[in-house]
Each structure stands twice: as structure tokens, then as C-alpha cells.
Image (cartoon, rainbow, N blue to C red):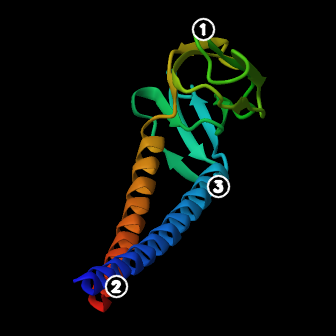
Amino acid sequence: MSKTFDASNVSRRKFLAVASTVAAASSLAVGKDSQSAQASAATVLPVHYLVTIDVTTGSVSYSALNKDTQQDVPMPNNSLTVNAGDEVKWQANTTGPKPRHRAGIRFTTTTPFAVKEFKWSENKSDGGNTQNAGTHPYCVGVFDKVKQEVYFDDPKIIVGGGVTVKAEIVEAKSELNEVKEKIESIEMLLSKAIEQL
């Protein structure tokens, strides 16, 4: 009886040693992957947006361009959604064969930038990199020097909106699939260890 007991203790010890080794190796691999995922998330390059304020039709309208991809960006309800660290610049489009204007934007309550105000004139743009998450309404003013008209509006910027959440969900799902694969691998190794006992 004591031989059987000793043999089962040896098998149990061997089993625990194998299981511990597999679990430790797997957790190190998970930790390494998590760190590399965090490092790659930390090295995400900022996106550069250019918002055009168009007053050529007699009213204010907006268009946004991702300057990195040269693709238009939707602005539902005159709102631009960006991530922290992205660059946003504004320019104005006014009338005339030689358009001349003065334009500016001002954040009245909160600002996603280091400053509350940007000003520019024809053939120029102004803006900066976003820093503060949240929804930030601002005032737009464009003085068309050719028409001697002033145009104003109140759009907003949303920093850290749905784009960030969607990216985090996709990344979390990918990490979950990797962990599931590692768990299946551990289960197979444990099953083989049990069979050898």
C-alpha cells in the first residue's frame, strides 16, 4: 500500500512540476505579448486633420481631411471626432479670384489644446495637437474682406470619442483570442502529462 502511495505522490509531483512549468512559461509569454501590445499602442502616430471652413456660398459649411491618407473625414452635426495627440488645423475658403480674409476660432469654456484661440489669414492655417479629452465647443469667425461679410458658427471637437473605444475593443478581442489559444495549448500539455502518469 505504501508503494502505491509513494508512486502516486511521485506521479503527482511530476504532474505538478510539468503543469507549473507550462503555466509559468505561458504566463511569461502572455506578459511579453501584453508588453509588446502596450508598446505598439504607445507608438501610435498622431493623425493630422485639416478642417476647411467654407463661406463661399454665403453660409458656413465644414469639410475635414485626414492629411496622412488624403481621405475625407465625416463631420456629423459639425463635430470632428479625434484622438488625444492628433493634430487639428483650420483654414478658410472665401470668395473671389483673389480671396482675402481673416479668420479665427476660440474655445470659450474648455479647450483640447494648450491654447484657447487660433487666428490666421488667407493662404494660411492654424491649429495644434489635442491634449484634453472630452467634448469641446468653439466659436468660428471668418471675415471675408472681398465681400465685407462676417460669418460665424459654433461647431465642436470631440477628443477621445468612438474611434478610441472601437480600437480598444478590437485590441482586447485580439488579446483574448491569443490567451484562448494559449489556454488550449496548456490544456493539451496537461492532458498529455496526465496520460503519461
Of badges 2 and 3, the one in the foreground is: 2
Task: Give the CA separation, mark 1 to mark 3.
Answer: 36 Å
Please give left or right for residue 61 compared with residue 144 in the image. Answer: left
**Residue 69 visible in image:** no
Furthest-front residue in this view: 2
**What residue appears at the point 46 percent right and 50 percent down from the top-left corner?**
167
In the figure, residue 146 lies in which quadrant?
top right
Image x and y of residue 59, in percent? 49, 21
Looking at the rendered structure, the kind of residue marked 1 is Thr
Which disc, if any, is residue 193?
2
Which disc, if any, is residue 39?
3
Q: In terms of secondary structure, where does tag 1 sit?
A: loop
In the figure, residue 107 lies in which quadrant?
top right
Looking at the rendered structure, the kind of residue marked 3 is Ala
Task: Give the CA separation, mark 2 to mark 3.
Answer: 36 Å
Which disc, if any, is residue 108?
1
- Camera-side residue of 60 and 7: 7
In the figure, residue 106 lies in which quadrant?
top right
Furthest-left residue in this view: 1
Q: Please, is residue 190 above or below residue 101 in the view?
A: below
- Camera-side residue of 152 and 160: 160
Image x and y of residue 186, in percent? 37, 75
Q: Which of marks 1 and 2 is nearer the N terminus?
A: 1
**What residue appears at the point 40 percent right and 72 percent down from the top-left corner?**
182
- Camera-side residue of 116 and 44: 44
Image x and y of residue 58, in percent? 52, 21
Task: Give the CA separation, mark 1 to mark 2.
Answer: 67 Å
